Amino acid sequence: MGLNNQVGPAAYKRNPWDRGHLTRRTAVTWGSKYEAKRASNDSCSYANASMQHENFNQDEWRVPERVVQHLEKDKNGRITIFTGPVFTQTDRWYTRRTLQQKVQIPSGFWKVVVYIGKESEQLESQAYILYQDAQFLLDKRGQHSIDIKNYQVTITEIEQLTGLEFDEALFNSNPLYFYPREGINNGPEGFSAPLGTVPEELNRGVVFNREDAKAPEFEARRRIIPHDEFLEFASRVRDV
């Protein structure tokens, strides 16, 4: 990471932004007393913190944390968590005279929970994205009304938002698939839209996943298709 990519306590003083734990302290405090204490201390570092609005940090973000805390689908109680912020080109920036650099405020946060399934005895995962949008910043009661399943996403979506690339085994372990399947999705939800309308974005292609197609050109689980091909497919789907 490097110190140049971290901010300290000065960035969180006298403002509504919390030092939001990306990985919750209680999620890592296990093992011997020494190991649990060391893990607890390690989690309380600025490398594990990101700017979360107090209404979001103390409200909606607790819901995916409870998913981890009360998970009952795992076989042996061993859970791996990947988590981090979502940065975009339209993020807000926080500045003040006492800061040497401006701080980019994440648009949202993602979390991937990985474990060995109790019934399947195979690698399984759940992935979520929650955004710090106007709806979530209204109050601290939203956690009681949201259905976390509505914020469950594919591994592919997190890859595209963050630039990270997960192992294929993790991609296969997620119950959601990033392509339309007959009887489930009849729209172009299986495609990732370009990030803008400039020619470079429109022509860069989109990720298209087709495991159910039998044509030879679709044998690969993932492939990049040209924008024109995407529009042709989307128009055919809408006409059905």
Image (spheres, rainbow, N blue to C red):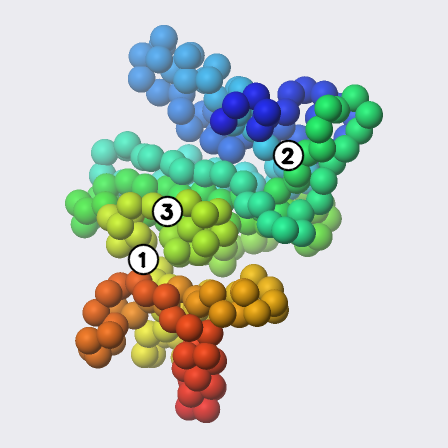
Numbered label attached to residue 51:
2
Q: Residue 195 at x, y = what percent?
A: 56, 62
Q: CA distance from mark 2 to mark 1?
A: 30 Å
Query: Which quadrant would residue 82 be assigned to in this image?
Result: top left
**Label 1, on which residue?**
175
The residue located at (28%, 32%) in the rendering is 78
Observer able to see residue 143 = no
Category of crowding for the residue at label 3, using alpha-carbon neighbours closer than 10 angstroms: few (below 14), some (14–19), many (at least 20): few
Apparent side of residue 204 relative to residue 169 in the rendered image (left or right): right
Query: Which of 93/61 is in front?
Result: 93
Q: Residue 215 at x, y = what percent?
A: 21, 79
Q: CA distance from mark 2 to mark 3?
A: 24 Å
Question: Is label 3 in a helix, a strand or a loop?
Answer: loop
Number of numbered markers: 3
Which residue is at the far top?
34
**Label 3, on which residue?**
165
- Disc 2 versus disc 1: nearer the observer: 2
Category of crowding for the residue at label 1, using alpha-carbon neighbours closer than 10 angstroms: few (below 14), some (14–19), many (at least 20): some
Label whose residue precedes the other's in the sequence (1 or 3): 3
- Amino acid at the residue labelled 2: Met
- Amino acid at the residue labelled 3: Glu
Question: Is label 2 in a helix, a strand or a loop?
Answer: strand
Label whose residue precedes the other's in the sequence (2 or 3): 2
